[in-house]
Image (cartoon, helix red, strand yellow):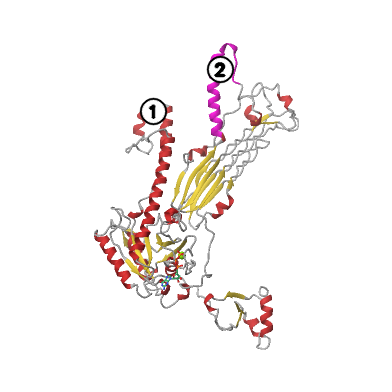
Amino acid sequence: MPLIYSNNLTLFLYPSIARSVSASNLTCWHSVLSYRRESLHVYTQKRKYAETSAATVTTYSAPSVTSVSPINDLSTNNLSHLDPSPDSYSITPFTDACTLTLSAGSGGHGCVSFLREKFIPDGPANGGDGGTGGSVYIQAVRGETSLHKLARRGILKAGRGKNGQGKGMGGERGEDLLVTVPVGTVLREIWRHDPVEEEELQEKLRRGIGEDAKAESADEGSTDQSRRWRRERWLLYPGTLPSQFLNTPFPALPRPRRSNLTVSQPPAPLNLDLDKPMDAPMLLAAGAMGGLGNPHFVTKSIPRPKFATKGEPGMALSLHLELKLLADVGLVGLPNAGKSTLLRSLSNSKARIGNWAFTTLQPNIGTVVLDDYRGRPRLDTLGRRKEPITNFTIADIPGLIEDAHLDRGLGLGFLRHIERAAVLAFVVDLHAGDAVTALKGLWREVGEYEALRDRELNARTEDRVEAEGGLVEFKPFESRISPQPGHADAATNETEASKDTVLSAELGRSLPPLTLPPISSKPWFVIATKADLPETKENFAALQNHLMSVQAGKDEHPSGKKNAWRKRLEAVPVSAIKGKGVQGIPELVVGLLDG
Ligand SMILES: Nc1nc2c(ncn2[C@@H]2O[C@H](COP(=O)(O)OP(=O)(O)OP(=O)(O)O)[C@@H](O)[C@H]2O)c(=O)[nH]1
Ligand SMILES: [Mg+2]
């Protein structure tokens, strides 16, 4: 395929266009092409960064899009993929924390309507009820990798229920809202505004005060009229003047109603860890009930009520969402250690690579496909057959520097993406000073992150205990299953009040507080990069000796923790830029993932 190389653009021509390009009019085509690129379907390719001094006309082979298997020998092909120019990378929008306000739909209003037919001038009331508002659901799904779409929107609302109509027609339900989040999202409630609950509370208070007042002035025969007339809750017949209602006796306002779906709502405050893909959405906030049509208010004294109730207002929830990426392996290393190059050599990732610190500014996830393991039967610890691992994911995060816990560099925030990884891979640069010191420094920062996390969790637990009004009662043998028919006697003895307490206690415990295992208990290994550079052998030998001593218990674990994982500590020397030594990593990881 003919090709013109112009300034910093290489132009591929379709054969039909190319045939018409001759040496004499090449210059002419050159200028035409540079101005009318789009209309001529010219492919453009940015000149490679390193080729600035190359000849002006050159042949170029487009990078082959092959699926990269780690078991392949990368030393022979695709090396340009491992040492790309700093501008050759792909980046996707990424947000790992955001605040979201969700509103369930309000109910539609009830309808005031009367039957009108020939010869029936004053037909009976036939206004339909309002539709229930849409509910808010959440679902953790595979394929989503960021919260940026939710962060941008900020406020999401379910649909409002439609108003009821004449001829007894109920309003349509409001449209439900489904919020999809990436697997690994942790969700915490900031505040909630539930108008129905508030009204119930007010009602209770009012009744309490009303009873006291009644007791005080029983002889006066006063009744609590507060629920009788609340203009904002009633919908009046269109065209009627309020003065016409002054003498109309209104029935008591119906109690605030909730949708039946409310029982499947998780208890407040929400504290969810969506760490698995969900088959079905989970209800967060049920839509509010619609208002009642005028037939509900027909009595002997008011046969043709000219009023209906309005729909209940929907509840609103403000949530803090935090995404903790769920990769199988987390790469932890100093800036410029070669983490992104390593990720590129193991997967098809297009992570940015550059010879300066903090090239990576947001996490990258790569998937390693294990073709070799296809169909191989595997056994678990109990000797049962289990599914072979066909792939695993690796998370490359921005580099950590010394005192990152004091917010130096990019801080420790990105460690949240590897804290749930099953295996940690510490990436140390053999050419950048003592590898053992670097490893200890990395573990120190990981330890600091863990301490911060534990402090935060403890503070939250204390808040919860305080909010519950004291110590949480520990009942290890309490059954979470509803009583069996045989135990019905015991259950029937319970009063209604105690049943409610048991139910709320059950609901309260159905979501365990978020707990994570100590990071030092995870399997880990070291990847010693840049082993191709001179004078790195001694450094690697010292690193290996250190790991052997740690494994044997002679040296202290670099995390400083006593019960830290030290079963099989290995250091793998690699030259990621040349694709050498990386072939053994997938097998090592699979061994550690299998336990
Ligand atoms: N000689 C040699 N150079 C390497 C090797 N691996 C990476 N490099 C180079 O080291 C530099 C940094 O590589 P990156 O992969 O961007 O390092 P990083 O750890 O992701 O850096 P940050 O994203 O800044 O934390 C680049 O210039 C790479 O070409 C290697 O195995 N051998
Ligand atoms: Mg990087």
Q: Which residue is mark 2?
A: 213
| Residue 503 image label | none
Q: Residue at x 34, y 74 (%)?
A: 535
Tag 1 and tag 2, C-beta contact below 8 Å: no
Magenta-colored stretch includes residue 433: no
Is label 2 within 8 A of ligand 1 (CB to nearest ligand atom)? Answer: no
Q: What's the amino acid at mark 2?
A: Ala
Asked which quadrant contains residue 392, the reply is bottom left
What is the quadrant of residue 491 in the picture?
top left
Q: Residue at x 56, y 39 (%)?
A: 315
Indicate which disc residue 492 carries: 1
For the residues marked 1 and 2, what is the alpha-carbon distance in whole angstroms? 36 Å
Vertical side of 160 occupied by 486: above or below: above
Secondary element at tag 2 = helix
Q: Residues within 10 Å of mark 2 (few under 14, many from 20)?
A: some
> Where residue 56 sits: x, y (%)?
59, 83
Region rendered in magenta: 196-224
Can residue 254 be seen here? yes
Image vertical order of residue 400 relative to residue 470, above or below: below
Residue 23 percent coordinates (x, y): 65, 88
Q: Residue furthest bottom?
A: 24
Q: Does residue 201 show up magenta in the picture?
A: yes
Decide: is 522 above or below 199.
below
- Residue 111: give x, y in percent of width and height: 67, 34
Amino acid type of the residue that numbered disc 1 sits on in the rendered structure: Thr
* Magenta part, dominant SS: helix
Toward the top, the furthest residue is 219
Numbered disc total: 2
| Left or right placement of residue 152 versus residue 237 in this view | left
In this orientation, which residue lies closer to the viewer: 384 or 587?
Answer: 587
